[in-house]
Amino acid sequence: MDVNKLVEVLQATLQPNQREEAERQLNEVHKIIGFVPTLLQVVMSDQLDKPVRQAGVIYLKNMVCQFWEEKEVAQVTDPVPFCIHETDKVFVREHIVETVIGAPEPVRVQLAVCISQLVKHDYPGKWPGIAEKVALYLQSDRVETWMGALVALYHLVKNFEYKKPEERGTLNQAMQVLLPLVHQRCVQLLPDESEMSVLLQKQILKIFSALTQYFLPLDLISKEAFTQWMELLRRIVERDVPEALAQVDEDDRPELPWWKCKKWALHILTRCFERYGSPGNVTKEYTQFSDWYLKSFSHGILQVLLVLLDKHRQKQYVSPRVLQLTLNYLNQGVSHSFSWKIMKPHMQVVIQEIVFPLMCHSDEDEELWHSDPVEYIRIKYDAFEEFFSPVTAAQGLLHAAASKRKEMLPKIMALVLEVLSSAELPPRQKAGALHVVGAIADILLTKKLYKSQAEAMLVTHVFPEFQSAHGYLRAMACWVLHCFCDVKFKNPHNLEQALLLTRSLLTKDTELPVQVEAAIALQALLTEQERAKDLLLPHTKDIVLELLKVVRETENEDLTGVLQKFVCAYGEEITPLAVEITTHLAHTFAQLLEGEGETSDEKAITAMGILNTMETIVIVMEDQKMILQHIEGVILNVIGIILQQNVIEFFEEMLSLVCSLTSEQVSDRMWNLFPMLYDFFQKDNVDYFTDMTAALHNYITVEPQKFLANPKHLEMIYNMCKTVLTSDAGEDPECHAAKLLEVILIQFKGQIDQVVPSFVELALERLTREVRTSELRTMCLQVVIAALYYSPPMLLETLEKMRLPNSTESITEQFLKQWIYDTDCFLGLHDRKICVLGLCALMATSADRSPAITAVSEQILPSCVLLFSGLQRAYAKRAQDEDEDDDDEENEDQDFEPAELEDEEDDIDEEGQQYLEQLNTGGGDDSEDDDEYDEAEETPLESYETPLDKEDCAVDEYQVFKGILQSLQMSDPGWYQKLTGHLTEAQKKEIQQIFVLADQRLAAKESKKIESAGGYRFANVAVPQAFNFGKS
């Protein structure tokens, strides 16, 4: 397709009535060699209209993203995936930098994505010249070429941003030339206040930021070079913005290049201080650098930042992000004596005139509160918004100063008391003072002086604001009470008052932000105050119904957690409301799905919370069969919506709901859902098999006879397991598939002869392919062991009939050798028990046993001894877990006062330092974790219970083992001799100990049976009136 024809087609894509035909034509020719270079020529042409160039560059970007990388075929028989021809790639590499340089901004943005892809796949191997070309254009005196060159360089550096130092060799080599060059250009641009100049400066700062974000290349950036960059950053932060910008609307000013440039400069300064310049909080390679950084730059940078804060204090405009980063830098400075001494003389003013006003209710808050209360709530509870908020930064600085530096807490509290005691106190300032108190509540409650006064402070200054005429003060009162929720109320009436005030705001207030704060405060009080549960009991219905209403109106995720707390705390009381609650939640869920748009991520989180709350209701109501029946119908409608609309975000929660609905019984409606789950799996949802396993396990084990009644059920489970075990699903799903096969064999012992060979073949076939973990290997072996437990003759016959390709050794021999070899890999109670029972079945085989069994005879009993040793530890661990007292809180020292730092002391974060070291070394040595895992004596799949794991199981592995050995001694002495003749004295002693334990377990079982029947019964129940303990 020539250039003119391609231009026509691209123009047609812009016309709604011609778009479909134009796209068809493009799809026909896009694989032809020469198409991509032609497309790039269209994008390069400044003679064409911008819309055509934009249409062309979007198509080019999509082509590069989809077809630049050379993909390998999954199967040899599969067609080779299309990839842009190397001839075309060469043309693109040669011309794309020039195209970026000459392109208008909308086109350049798309081309930048293309460069990113090219760098990712071709640099340095096939595209080593990009760095040289960028340098060439940056060395040019033609300023108009710099932006395109800088954009290309940014994406080159960005590609290495997360790579470790040892993987950055080619980049560092290129940056030896480029980094001094971009610094020189930035210094050269500083006097020029034009927008273009500042945009170029911003782009240079973004490059330096990407280069140093996670690693500071000390071999590339010498101390001299670093000092030059710090001076450059300091000058950018310090310089005034043009006076003309004051005419721009305040809402638009943060997006102006001048403020964005300052933002990037501060981002780099803050990042360098936190990650590389904070002694005691850095990894080893930056230890010396951090000392040098702190002493070399603290004074100059802090002076500039304090001037910036003073401008804000004097009501001069400072963008929110710049203010936030400035406060964060000061926050880091609090920890170090060197920087603290510089800051300390100014901190009283900073707290009083910068931090405190930021924590007051602002004009922007007030406007949003009234114009869009739901958006106000969204922003307040959005962690991402908080991360960039100056208010959060101010709160962080306040907390750091109060907790780490002497004299600061008394000064802060003196300011608070002065504000709260003022006769003519403006309500917004009162809100600010309460905000300060709440922000440092955790510190106050560790100090005896303030802790003893906390209750009085709440009664005097917080309780009255619950009746304030200002909604934001009522909300703030709830928030402060939430912050002090674990106060020990000496006067019971004060706790009653706190609950009454909070509950009244939730159920009667007309302003949504107040109701949300009240709900969260109630949850905190219910969690922390022992008496709160009884005091709120009479009002449960009103609280829950109002919560449902506020959840629907606000779509706030935090409130679903509050609702779950009340459902768990008041299960009996909400029983009459359970169906109404579930129905209300179902409608809210449907509303969230219908309204997904700009805030779909937040709504998705709320929707997940709703599904989790529904599951909580199901769990709480599990004994209320009639109510559960109604709830089930409502939830099935929700599940139907998720399946029909294929809402992938909620698949895990949906499958968890199915599991909860089938944990105690499986209704007819839930049986009708079973084929739908199978269809769901078949629609390319293998990735969710692990999440499905718990529900499938319930279908198999909760009502086993109903499961067997329909042969399709067994067929569906087998097909799913086969799909997982024969595809590339991953070893964790494969372990779950093998577990289900094992569960079925144990659950239906003697009832499913027709499928046993298929199960065994499937498990053994998986072992013929690469297995990376012992978990999968032992799990597949366990399927065969379960088949041995199911029927030894059937399994041995199946194994004798099977043949593996390229092997003359019998399957039986290979299986037994692998099993014995892996005995030590069977962990937990269940796995060891089934292993012991399998070995017992081997020992109990008839006299004409397979030679393969005879060949391993000397290893059977030592393997049993090893397994019983593990079982003994596992049973002991279980008993210990059951006896452990979880009341850790009693051991906490409630009166512990963390020490504040003297001016000469530094705050050293040793745990954080160790964590950073681990990250840098790829996670560190995990041998300790392995030890902990062995000590725990559990397996992840132990929760999938079989009849062998039930408490009342009649099959005891100790007694089975003892019974078989004693029987063989009498009935088959020759085989017994083969099994025992080689045992060491230590092994014989251990077997005797196993026999003793078998007797003890039998006696304990009999005792328990008698106890459950009401105890021993004596023939003579008459009690004598007198006892003679002496001689007659």
Image (spheres, helix red, strand yellow):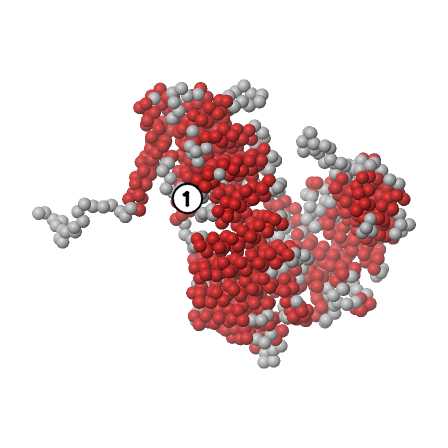
Q: Are there few (<14), some (14-19), or many (20+) residues within 10 Å of tag 1? A: some
Question: To which quarter of the image does residue 589 belong?
Answer: bottom right
Q: Is residue 730 above or below residue 622?
A: above
| Percent coordinates x, y for residue 440 in the rendering | 56, 65
In the picture, measured across the screen, residue 187 lies left or right of residue 936, that is: right
Figure quadrant of the N terminus: top right
Q: How many marks?
A: 1
**Residue 698 on image: x %, y %:** 48, 44
What type is the residue that disc 1 sits on? Arg
Residue at left offset 63%, top offset 70%: 360
**Up-down relation of residue 8 to residue 990 (above or below):** below
- For the residue pair 325 and 70, the one nearer the viewer reads as 70
Q: Position of residue 102 (x, y in %)?
A: 87, 49
Horizontally, residue 169 falls left or right of residue 45, namely left
Residue at the disc numbered 1: 878
The x, y position of residue 562, in whole percent, is 53, 60
Residue at far right of view: 47
Where disc 1 sits, the SS reads: helix
Q: Residue at x 55, y 75 (%)?
A: 467
Q: Which residue does the image show at 63% across and 65% down from the upper left?
A: 374
